[in-house]
């Protein structure tokens, strides 16, 4: 790629925080999520070919021939897989894609649970959309990103991350119909509180098998009832059958317990926020964090029991914040970040405590971003 790229257009897509609904989206559940003021940005110039060439900070140059959008096993887990996968979705659905040269920069820490991969997917979709003039909706772009991540990249994620990045703001998303999720903007005023993510130093990069186990184990429970997803199983029928389900493994049953509890909790969180009931909302955030820790069990990789940064961060947060604030695992879990709501009066104390445990700058205060992915004009 030439060192000088004529800047024709600039596109961006934000990262996200997960506020409620940990690992419920892939079971067609309900989630609360918000875009944040961290983003991936790309300056682009169409190159008149069928080739996408992207130079990314820390990742060098990735070149993809988008005339061939077949799945390539040797690209699993790579930037090329995401580009090719998004291009494949566009082509399959009748949208044009054009080659371009681009430079990507990002302040979303990779592997931190802030959805750097989803932001890149949404960014790529917006570039294709913008350069070709295709009439592609934010939901289409989110679906293209999920398709790329599931089929080409090889990570069995739900759609929450991509929807959050594509739409922006704070939203409740109901995935009962995953092709047409119900997306509801939520009005929330966190006056008196700061939103913070604590980076515990672990990375999500090698944890795809852990995420796959969660969806597989939840699916094993739903399959026992002849259903494909836990959303299709009646909660009372599940609880009356626990004894018969234990042959699937107690962890699978506990993960289903988490799903049912979390899926009921999310709409109540949304109502609490709409009514300005912050104390009730924070109590449910704490309940969500405990459910992930005890039932979902995604606080650390069981193959590496000596590394439990998320659990430690939750314990320290509980000690510092007590009932004045709240913390929970942010995103997929096993490593990465926790999300905390910190009273303004405790910002310094909380930041110092987290930095002492996880290093300077571990605590990052964020703002919710109203806009999703798109062109910067």
Image: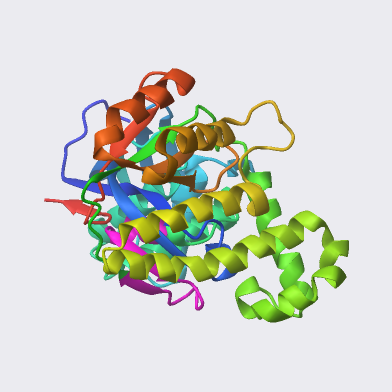
Q: Is residue 220 above or below residue 321?
A: below
| Residue 141 coordinates in the image, percent (x, y) | 37, 62
Task: Answer with left or right where residue 134 lies relative to residue 358.
Answer: left
| Residue 247 coordinates in the image, percent (x, y) | 88, 63
Task: Answer with left or right where residue 190 lies relative to residue 8.
Answer: right
Check residue 43 for magenta coloring: no
Task: Answer with left or right where residue 35 lies relative to residue 110.
Answer: left
Check residue 164 for magenta coloring: yes
**Color style of the picture:** rainbow
- Looking at the rendering, the stretch of residues picked out in magenta corresponds to 162-184
Task: Report if residue 259 is visible in the image.
Answer: yes
The residue depicted at 37 percent of the width and 49 percent of the height is: 16
Q: Outermost residue toward the front?
A: 323
Number of marks in picture: 0
The residue depicted at 58 percent of the width and 66 percent of the height is: 261
Task: Answer with left or right where residue 29 lies relative to residue 271.
Answer: right
Q: Is residue 160 above or below residue 294?
A: below
The residue depicted at 55 percent of the width and 38 percent of the height is: 204
Q: Is residue 351 above or below residue 289?
A: above
Task: Report if residue 90 is visible in the image.
Answer: no
User: Residue 129 versus residue 372: which sits nearer the camera?
Assistant: 372
User: Residue 224 versus residue 186: which sits nearer the camera?
Assistant: 186
Q: Is residue 253 above or below residue 238?
A: above
| Residue 174 coordinates in the image, percent (x, y) | 45, 72
| Residue 236 coordinates in the image, percent (x, y) | 68, 80
Q: Which quadrant does the N terminus fall into?
A: top left
The residue depicted at 26 percent of the width and 50 percent of the height is: 368
């Amino acid at each position: 790629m030439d060192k000088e790229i004529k800047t024709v257009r600039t596109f961006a897509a934000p990262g996200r925080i997960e506020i409620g609904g940990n690992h419920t989206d892939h079971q067609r559940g309900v989630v609360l999520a918000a875009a944040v003021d961290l983003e991936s940005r790309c300056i682009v110039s169409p190159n008149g070919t069928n080739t996408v060439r992207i130079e990314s900070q820390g990742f060098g140059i990735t070149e993809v021939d988008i005339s061939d959008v077949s799945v390539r096993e040797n690209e699993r887990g790579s930037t090329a897989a995401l580009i090719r996968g998004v291009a494949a979705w566009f082509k399959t659905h009748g949208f044009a894609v054009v080659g371009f040269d681009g430079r990507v920069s990002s302040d979303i820490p990779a592997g931190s649970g802030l959805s750097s991969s989803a932001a890149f997917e949404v960014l790529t979709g917006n570039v294709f959309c913008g350069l070709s003039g295709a009439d592609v909706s934010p939901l289409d772009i989110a679906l293209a990103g999920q398709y790329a991540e599931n089929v080409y990249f090889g990570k069995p994620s739900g759609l929450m991350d991509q929807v959050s990045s594509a739409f922006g703001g704070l939203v409740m998303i109901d995935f009962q119909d995953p092709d047409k999720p119900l997306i509801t903007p939520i009005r929330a005023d966190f006056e008196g509180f700061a939103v913070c993510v604590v980076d515990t130093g672990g990375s999500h990069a090698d944890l795809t098998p852990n995420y796959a186990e969660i969806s597989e184990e939840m699916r094993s429970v739903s399959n026992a009832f002849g259903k494909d997803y836990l959303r299709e199983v009646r909660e009372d029928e599940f609880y009356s059958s626990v004894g018969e389900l234990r042959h699937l493994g107690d962890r699978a049953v506990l993960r289903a317990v988490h799903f049912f509890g979390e899926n009921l909790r999310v709409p109540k969180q949304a109502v609490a926020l709409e009514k300005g009931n912050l104390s009730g909302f924070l109590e449910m955030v704490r309940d969500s964090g405990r459910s992930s820790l005890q039932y979902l069990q995604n606080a650390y990789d069981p193959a590496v029991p000596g590394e439990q940064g998320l659990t430690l961060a939750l314990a320290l947060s509980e000690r510092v914040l007590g009932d004045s604030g709240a913390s929970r695992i942010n995103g997929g879990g096993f490593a990465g970040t926790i999300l905390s709501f910190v009273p303004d009066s405790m910002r310094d104390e909380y930041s110092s405590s987290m930095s002492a445990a996880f290093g300077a700058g571990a605590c990052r205060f964020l703002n919710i971003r109203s806009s999703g992915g798109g062109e910067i004009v």
